[in-house]
Amino acid sequence: MRVELSQAFEKAAGVPCLDISLPGPVSLRELLELLARERAFFAKYLSYQDDALLGAHLSVFCAGRLLKLDDAVDDGDTVKLFLPVTGG
């Protein structure tokens, strides 16, 4: 699986994307656990156990669709991580 990082995450990770091997389909929740093992700064997103709470801090897209915590992703997918857009 390819995880493409927005500029804010790229700065923290030191790379524009991460390649992670998945054993099969996993939920977004499980993917976040794998990312936290790969890069410790993702661990803070594990505490958000609700889609609305996570969405206030992180947006994850796959195939143009915003993912929820229980949505599945697979090894051949590409996901994109963004900080949510805010403004006033």
Image (spheres, rainbow, N blue to C red):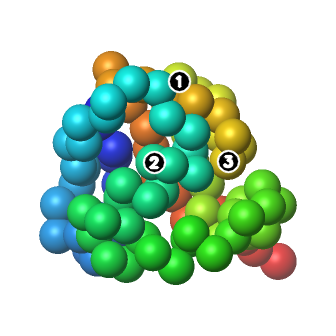
Callout 2–callout 1 Cβ contact below 8 Å? no
- The residue at the point 37 percent across, 78 percent down is 41
Query: Which residue was labeled with disc 1?
Result: 63
The amino acid type, in three-letter code, at marker 2 is Leu
- x and y percentages locating residue 56 in the rendered image: 74, 68
| CB atoms of marks 3 and 1 within 8 Å | no
> Which residue is found at the position 69% from the left and 70% from the top?
48
For residue 69, the mark is 3
Quadrant in the picture for the N terminus: top left
Give the residue at the far front of this rendering. Answer: 23
Q: The residue under label 1 is which amino acid type?
A: Ala
Residue 81 shows up from this direction: yes
Report the front residue among 68 and 7: 68
Question: Residue 19 or 33: which is nearer the viewer?
Answer: 33
Q: Nearer the viewer, mark 3 or mark 1?
A: 3
- Which of 22 and 16 lies nearest the eye of the viewer? 22
Above or below for 85 versus 24: below
Report the amino acid beneath label 3: Leu
